[in-house]
Amino acid sequence: MLSKETQLILIPTLKKYFGYDSFREQQQEIIESVLSRKDNLVIMPTGGGKSVCFQLPALLFDGITLVISPLIALMKDQVDGLTANGIPAAFFNSSQLSSAQNGIFDKVINSEIKLLYVAPESLALLENILNEKYISCVAIDEAHCISSWGHDFRPSYQQLGFLKHSLPNTPIIALTATADKATRQDIVDQLNIPNATQFLTSFDRKNIELEVRPANDRVTQIIKFIHKKPNEAGIIYCLSRKSTEQLASKLKQNGIKAMPYHAGLTFEERTKTQEDFLFDKTQIICATIAFGMGIDKSNVRWVIHYNMPKNIEGYYQEIGRCGRDGVKANAILFHSYADVIQLRNFAAGASNEDVQLAKLERMQQFSEATTCRRKILLGYFGELLSDNCGNCDVCKNPPQFFDGTVIAQKALSVITRLNESEATSVIIDVLRGAKNATIVDKGYDKLKSHGVGKDISWHDWQQYIIQLINQGFCEIAFHKNNALQLTSFSQKVLFEKKMVYLTKPIAFKEQAVVQKEIKEIKAKKDTLFERLRKLRYKISLEENIPAYLVFSDATLKEMERTRPMSQSDFLEISGVGQRKLEVYGDEFISEIISFMDGKIPKKKKGDTYKVTYDLYKEGLTIDEIAENRNLSPTTIFSHLAKLYADGKEIDIYDFVTKEEVELVRKAKEAMDSPATLKPYYDFLNDEMEYFKIRMALTILIRPPNPKRGN
């Protein structure tokens, strides 16, 4: 049981370091369980806030929290995010120089970091610190990798069972976004934490719109979709390396910043592609499923599956990489029977072939559904949704059924006349009356049924046959070159007048792709969000961190909605903690005020500074002014800096010494005048407060006038 003092400090710690005023679903219960030194298994959707469940306790433990993560290349991203929030963290891997590794050991021994990220393969190198003198908690991220029942099994994770024996009194928290019942049991067994408290939060990501489309002319559909979403980051998942490269090339030919990502690229190429995506230099990644695990990029606005995934776990994990900030996002899946056949071939001969095929069948059922897709998706993970979601393609455009008995009879008749030996494409060619080489050579053009369906397009016939397969009126014989064959239901349609109901195929208009004159996608019109987004991007380049680590899209949208023009109001924004207020507050507030210029009377704009100045001239201290105005002292310091810069009489050296100004001057020269405060703070080894840096820079811009006494 946690002490009352510890419970009371949780929300202030959350706000100070992460910028949030309240916990999400089950986060507080999980954090309290970790702080009570219990083992835990946390199943929480991507974007649900898993990281906070171990990052916040790490701040309150005496020792370090060891975080085991599967991909070395992504650890820097995690550590950059923590550092941006003022949390000391580091990563350790075998590629680092021994001097760097020794430096990390020193930081652990001297209690200078709170979290240490490491890949399972590098654990053996931590032997010197892998004891309870230094380690207070172990967090195992992407824990589904430990289980052969999971969708992304990694043998290196199976060694982690030794941790509980080496650190018997240290709480272990295993976390993943996707794990069915069998995988969950396997995780706790493999980690030797049989008594772990299990937290299973809702899998429902309401902000993600789910959509499945037929895979006809996918490239045109994708280009059209992207052109409607300028500047929005997205990921397109493909089955093969070749597909990622071909698709990226076609997108670039149409003025879209896209790059391929797959295991066949060199480490340097993959690293650069990933960093360019994280830093918003590349808008779109065309990738195999190797891309995206562990990436916390919160401003990915959409995910497209160019091919059908092999199971629902993988699909759910991948779509979860968009909309992590809770803002509206899109997940589009292109479905074709060619993908089903290819995935079945991939599974053939595997040691767990039956399991893979069963999971593929569930994925196929999801793709072909005519009922709410979210219900199916959540139901797979054991979560029941009572009402339709209203945010999937089926809910938004319910299928319209019609009497398709004659269509079904024509298709089944052709299958019969071809002796149940031909695949879908040949069946359709016969129905449409085609006279290509295959049809003529086999004499199919002489059949009585040849051309009986020529009034229906090839695309529509394909969709109708898929529906007939789904309803059990025919089936694919995968072991006979994917031939279509009849079932017991077929006879009822052909000879017993059983009615068949079909839905009209969804039509996507094909538009020619213009390649003669390539133009970059135009940005949206001048909105406050766009201005704040550009400011965020500028800061990210200056500080060499991904833009979303400055502020998420959700935080920028709240700024756009509430338009805070004081530091106290700015601190009320979700996602703004004390450190980010100090580092970025003035710049974003200035941008908001600049945007509002002309909409707010000038007199009203100046009022807040005038009130502060009048109280200052009355002789009140900074704390007294802050209390009088119900503002933070940091805000009052920013007011005084601006008043001084505007020529008001302020005894500026009351707040910063000449020696401190000289230190800032040297830092300014050494770093070539950076635009933000954080580089100064880092350069000065975190030893000078932000308000002093701000005051010193103000003096350097406008030196005191001896004649005026300021």
Image: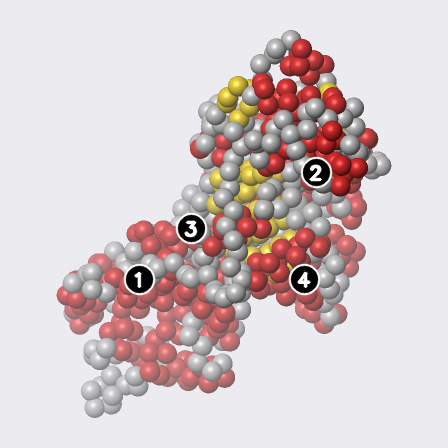
Q: Secondary structure at mark 4?
A: helix
Residue 176 in view (yes/no): no
Q: Which residue is mark 3?
A: 554
Image height of 486 relative to 328, above or below:
above
Q: Three-letter amino acid code at disc 3? A: Ala
Q: Where is residue 59 shown, x and y percent of the image? A: 54, 53
Residue 678 in view (yes/no): yes
Earlier-in-chain disc, 2 versus 3: 2
Q: Three-letter amino acid code at disc 1? A: Ile
Q: Which residue is mark 1?
A: 592
Quarter occupied by residue 477: top right
**Location of the N terminus (image quadrant):** top right
Image height of 389 relative to 642, above or below:
above
Please state if 1 lies on the left or on the right of 414 as rendered.
left
Q: Which residue is mark 4?
A: 270
Earlier-in-chain disc, 1 versus 3: 3
